Image: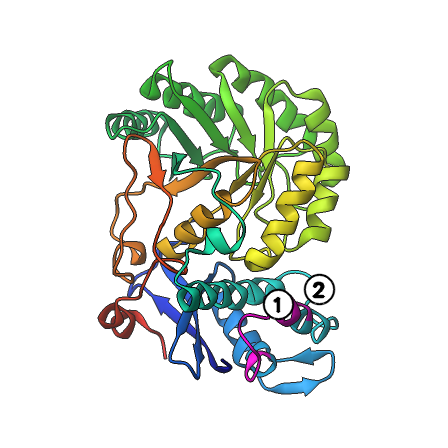
Amino acid sequence: MKITKVEAMYLRLPAVKEQCDSGQDALIVRVETDAGITGLGEVDSAPMAVKGVIEGPYSHTITCGLGHLAVGEDPFATEKIWHKMYTANVYSGRRGIAIHAMSGIDMALWDIKGKALGMPVWKLLGGGFHSRIRCYASSLFGATPEATGELARRFRGRGFDAVKFGWHPMGQDERTDLALVREARRGLGDDADLMIDAGLVWDAKTALQRANAFAEQRIFWLEEPLRADDYEGYRKLSEAASVRIAAGEEESNRLSYLELMDRGRIDVVQVDLTRCGGFTEGMKIAALAQDRGLPVANHGFTTYINVMAALHWLNSIPNALICEFVAEEETNLREQITRQRVRARDGWLDIPQEPGLGIDLDEDAIRRYRVA
């Protein structure tokens, strides 16, 4: 079996709000083979930049379109193809966009392997730790503290016993920050876990003050309070704070995760398979975290392709903590572009059992939302 085509499809809602909601557009990767087996992947990044990295032509030996590199290869050779893509882009892509783009291709290759063998990806990865995994409802903050409390009550009513709120209006001022977390806890009740995603808004001193204040509301973790490159700030914060510090979604391969773990000293390692290099690199990152006694959780605020990939991955590693599950109720691409829709039951997600990723595109929706 050989790869015959690598396609990057940009999907977008007709109207996109200027807010931190990556469910409004999507970059889907489709890899075709001469055996008629097609694999799907996803990239959560700058969509058109990723499309260029994947579909761009050969330039020279250390900057080359990823699709060009993959065509003609055996899709089972995931480690070889990953290394080929990385080494052929060392000039332009050792971090960031090119690694993101590689993630989508790698994910699609594992989907192909699973379909060809009639096995779910987690079984190919040697997994089987869970039959289901606990998830948390992931949401943006409400526009006000009171609206946030109402959202928390709604998620609790849907059976979630863990909820995360993040981003705006967190970081405007101390009074608002404290009120957001207080009302979130009030709405959620005392018997559920509350995660807070600050959204990269503070310096280390301010983050420590907030972490200590939020500890009164018994938050489960404080996520990404500092700018992504402030590893020394993360070290100071992690060593001084009583609450867990979580981060990782901005990192793009195992070398940058080592910076976050060994220099930043974080407590929970968050990995997005659509950014970190796919399953091939995600397994290595999880192993590095396990060696350091650190739990990992996925990051995912995009489509159900990302969710399904995360479930396979979390079922394949011994240090999986919990699964992020977007619980926003507004209409977005997530509910429309795949034939399968993932649903939580009493705060748990079932591990997929179908071959490959176990998810298929709705081709009518793809045509409707695809940007030429």
Look at the image and give the residue range highlighted in magenta: 70-83
* Residue 224, percent from left and from top: 58, 38
* Residue 107, percent from left and from top: 50, 62
User: Based on the displayed image, in which of its 4 quarters is residue 156 positioned?
Assistant: top left
Neighbour tally class for label 2: few under 14, some 14-19, many 20 plus, Cα within 10 Å: some
Residue that numbered label 1 is attached to: 98
In the picture, the disc for residue 94 is 2
Quadrant containing the C terminus is bottom left
Q: Secondary structure at mark 1?
A: helix
Q: Which amino acid type is marked by label 2?
A: Arg
Identify the residue shown where x is 39% and y is 30%: 163
Q: Secondary structure at mark 2?
A: loop
Of all residues shown, which one is farthest toward the front?
Answer: 117
- Circles 2 and 1, Cβ within 8 Å, touching? The answer is yes
Q: Is 148 placed left or right of 72 in the picture?
A: left
| Inter-mark Cα distance, 2 to 1 | 7 Å
Q: Is 335 placed left or right of 250 in the picture?
A: left
Neighbour tally class for label 1: few under 14, some 14-19, many 20 plus, Cα within 10 Å: many
Q: Eyeballing the image, is 41 above or below 130?
A: below
